[in-house]
Amino acid sequence: MLDWTIVANNADLVPGSDRAFNSYSPPSLNNSALVVFRARTSGGQAQGEPITGVFSRDMAALSPVGSVVRRNDLVPQPNNTGATFNEFPSFARIDARSGMVATRGQSQPVWEVTDPNTGDPITRVGTAGIYATPNGGALVTGMSGVGAVPGFAQFQVPPDAVGAAGVKFDQFPGAPSAFDQQLVAFKGNYTDPQGNGQTGVFYRDTLGTGGAVTIAHSGQPLPNGGGVFGSTAPPSAANGQIVFTGLDNEDAPSAGGIYHARVGQPGLTTLVSFGQTVPGVSNPSGTTLNQIGEALSFDGRRVAFWGAWGTETRMVTLTCPSEGQASVIQACIDQSGGTGQVTREVPVHQGIFQVDVATGALTLVAETGGEFEDFLFWTFSGRPSGVGGGDGGEEFEEPRWRSSPFIAANGQNTVFKASEGASNPFGLYLDRGAALAPVTILDSTMLGDLLDPSASGLPITALALERDGFRNGRLAIAASMANEEESWAGVYLTQIAVPEPGSVALLAGGLLLLGAARRPRRAA
């Protein structure tokens, strides 16, 4: 049975305050057990706005929870307006080999442009940015939306991606990836001089004076043919390497794949292609990949990802959230026609895969059709127009339903989230890459006692995992537990030993003992 350690839970106060955490994003951790996570407190009329921020805790030293950056903190330079942070839209990530944290941040406009003749204000820009702690040090601006302002060429879109100098980034969707002590890889959206929205994948040295370096951009030919990049996904990076999913068309892709780049070297290598045969499957409607997920977990050697094949689909019903930002909830209800529910098609044939960067070998880790029904989980997220203020001109992604798999790789080992169906709608599972079936770590039939004494007797109601949450044999997750009367939540850490080849079966048997703590399964 796995032993879990509390990183932070609802009993912990936000550093320097008298208010306790009550909500957590999936955590990331480095090889030395430094855990980083986004969290918030409750809010309301009596309490004022919630305390929101990015926090960390060194679990090797069991030091107290510390703050990386919080709402209302001053934004690092460039900042001539005294702008402060107001939002951290994505989960925070950490470099595997250092204490460098990277996070996306939204703020008040950071720069006021003035008329050089009169000194009068002309405009205020820069509400979107990427912020990092290179080498585990002070927070710096890794990228900012001020690239069109003279004197800030380091923050502009690289001219080779847009065909002109002085173009700013509009937004940095998703979570930037911290790697190699001071580098950050990210997705950037921008508008070309003709007024067309474009996108690309880039990296930058957060301690250098140089600008971003282009990895791929809209209109660039796909290395494996079939068209040009029409969309790119937020990248993952490690050991001087960057991987990302790129497609010809985000809404109806017919070409693309997963691509690999090396820092300082030109060109892209194709790791996985649309139309590539899925190993070991049989299906009359097709056995080649026709969907590839955006979320990639990368340890510098192996990439774990989600994919689908075949033409069969099934319908899922999605219900609008009841908790969270009121404007987002209302947008969901409005989009549903007032019912609060919508339906979506999902592929029947889905898999969790690993591809080896060194050998090109593609491995099917787990698939639907047996124990598992689905690897996709849905959230309604985004920022409604007119919400949040700011006059920097940056674009925001409108709220909509988004599906995503949840995967974390550590060598040949993969942890993933899956649904077994109505009787067990979510769980975390471990595959050891040794011809053994995946084993259950935690799922919705279990009680919170397994994670936290304060959750004794409470059913597990949510489990969250992200792509940098499984490193050096340690697994970090976020979890919620609740019944009709009370609730609890926190961030938790466990050690999953890397076995000798002859002991893999023993480990699998030990993990299966977790079943003793299951609640009786609900009827299907």
Image (cartoon, rainbow, N blue to C red):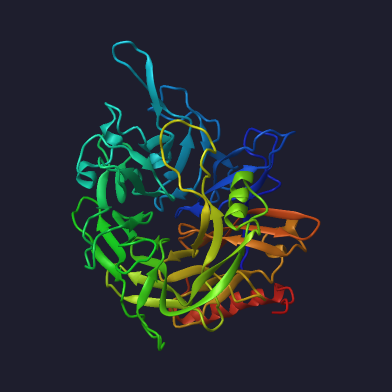
Looking at the image, residue 139 sits to the left or right of residue 386; the answer is left
Screen quadrant of the C terminus:
bottom right
Location of the N terminus by quadrant is bottom right
Q: Position of residue 350 (x, y in %)?
A: 46, 76
Give the residue furthest to the right.
485
Q: Is residue 504 left or right of residue 303?
A: right
**Looking at the image, which is closer to me, 523 or 456?**
523
Whether residue 497 can be seen here: no
Query: Which residue lies at the image location 39% right of the left edge and 70% below the top edge?
Result: 291
Q: Is residue 461 above or below residue 362?
A: above
The part of the image, by quadrant, that contains residue 336 is bottom right
Number of numbered callouts drawn: 0
Farthest front residue? Answer: 337
The image position of residue 47, as x and y in percent, is 72, 34
Q: Is residue 505 left or right of residue 268?
A: right
Q: Is residue 384 left or right of residue 433?
A: right
Residue 27 in the image, given as x and y percentages of width and height: 53, 53
Q: Is residue 93 above or below residue 142?
A: below
Relative depth, front residue between 48 and 91: 48
Residue at 69 percent of width and 38 percent of height: 19
Q: Is residue 207 above or below residue 352?
A: above
Q: Residue at x 34, y 59 (%)?
A: 244
Residue 517 picture quarter:
bottom right
Which percent across, then down, holds residue 415? 50, 68
Q: Residue at x 21, y 36 (%)?
A: 165
Q: Is residue 405 above or below residue 194?
A: below
Asked whether the viewer can see residue 218, the reply is: yes
